[in-house]
């Protein structure tokens, strides 16, 4: 631990604080969305029932379907109609985005970090991971998108509950040219990945999701059956940072681990460029729709 800081909170303390804060307000809805995503028998009605009891979420869905992007001849006010027009799969991702986004809203910039840029990076990682599963593995990868959105939730938690320490972490990372996790370990004695995994486990989300978040910087520590998602998340995180999309907490990346993950996943480098092109197109579309 860093010699000039004494950490006042354990990870268990932090999880307790999170569960008493506004961050925990996303728990029930996100959990329900993840269940719908993972259940092959889920229907548009399940999603409608979830959306309509969350007024801000319902408003966002109706705002989107009535936006110039869809150019509909008449205004839509029915959630089920909106689901049909937007598409069941697309709206599952939209609802997940909107709930997770709620914890990224307060925007304060410091040492190159801001919640907005972290959110953009998280969305990019989610999109990239999803595209890897669908294009390379021909699988839906049900938890990959959610893992991408939530993979850096531990950074948000440090930002909110360990503000003084977090400012020292950011400063140390920049001044000493270190990756964020190294500075976290020295100052706190643990990292944002450990915080994130503890929260997701406490919320009883799928184990695959917890491991993806907990080991997205150290995929070599996770083996089957969850190694595939963790390695995919590592590749997505690495490549999005390589392409300077949003906030990057790993400015000094491990190319050896990256190549090892690519080999294990049997992904060719040119495929990453094609996927990144699709990610950038989706990000631009989301910005046009007011979703970023």
Image (cartoon, grey):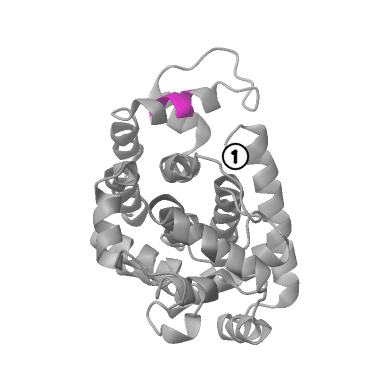
The single residue placed furthest to the top in the displayed view is 74
Q: Nearer the viewer, residue 38 or 208?
A: 208
Q: Which residues are magenta?
A: 58-62
Query: Per the image, is 59 magenta?
Result: yes
Name the residue tied to disc 1: 292
- Residue shown at 48% from the left, 86% from the top: 220
Residue 247: quarter of image: bottom right
Count of numbered circles on the image: 1
- Secondary structure that dominates the magenta span: helix
Q: Locate residue 150: give its quadrant.
A: bottom left
Q: Is residue 194 above or below residue 118?
A: below
Q: In the picture provided, is 255 more to the left or to the right than 21?
A: right
Callout 1 crowding tier (Cα within 10 Å): few <14, some 14–19, many ≥20: some
At 70% from the left and 68% from the top, the residue drawn is 272
Looking at the rendered image, the quarter that the C terminus falls into is top right
In this rendering, is residue 246 above or below 48? below
**Viewer-closest of 102 and 228:** 102
Q: Which residue is painted at 41% across and 57% down in the image?
A: 162
């Amino acid at each position: 631990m860093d010699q000039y800081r004494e950490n006042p909170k354990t990870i268990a303390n932090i999880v307790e604080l999170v569960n008493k804060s506004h961050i925990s307000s996303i728990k029930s809805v996100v959990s329900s969305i993840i269940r719908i995503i993972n259940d092959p028998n889920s229907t548009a009605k399940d999603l409608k029932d979830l959306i309509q009891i969350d007024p801000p979420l319902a408003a966002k869905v109706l705002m989107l379907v009535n936006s110039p992007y869809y150019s509909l001849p008449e205004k839509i006010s029915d959630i089920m109609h909106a689901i049909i027009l937007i598409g069941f799969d697309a709206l599952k991702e939209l609802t997940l985005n909107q709930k997770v986004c709620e914890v990224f809203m307060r925007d304060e910039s410091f040492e190159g970090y801001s919640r907005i840029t972290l959110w953009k990076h998280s969305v990019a990682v989610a999109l990239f991971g999803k595209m890897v599963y669908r294009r390379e593995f021909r699988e839906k990868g049900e938890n990959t998108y959610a893992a991408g959105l939530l993979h850096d939730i531990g950074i948000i938690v440090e930002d909110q509950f360990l503000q003084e320490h977090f400012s020292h972490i950011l400063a140390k990372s920049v001044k000493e040219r270190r990756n964020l996790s190294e500075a976290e370990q020295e100052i706190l004695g643990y990292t944002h990945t450990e915080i994130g995994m503890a929260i997701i486990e406490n919320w009883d989300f799928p184990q695959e999701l917890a491991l993806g978040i907990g080991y997205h910087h150290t995929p070599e520590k996770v083996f089957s059956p969850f190694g595939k998602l963790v390695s995919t998340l590592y590749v997505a995180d690495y490549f999005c940072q390589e392409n300077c999309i949003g906030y990057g907490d790993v400015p000094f990346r491990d190319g050896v681990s990256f190549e090892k993950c690519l080999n294990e996943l049997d992904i060719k480098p040119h495929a990453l460029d094609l996927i990144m092109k699709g990610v950038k197109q989706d990000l631009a579309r989301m910005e046009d729709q007011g979703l970023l």
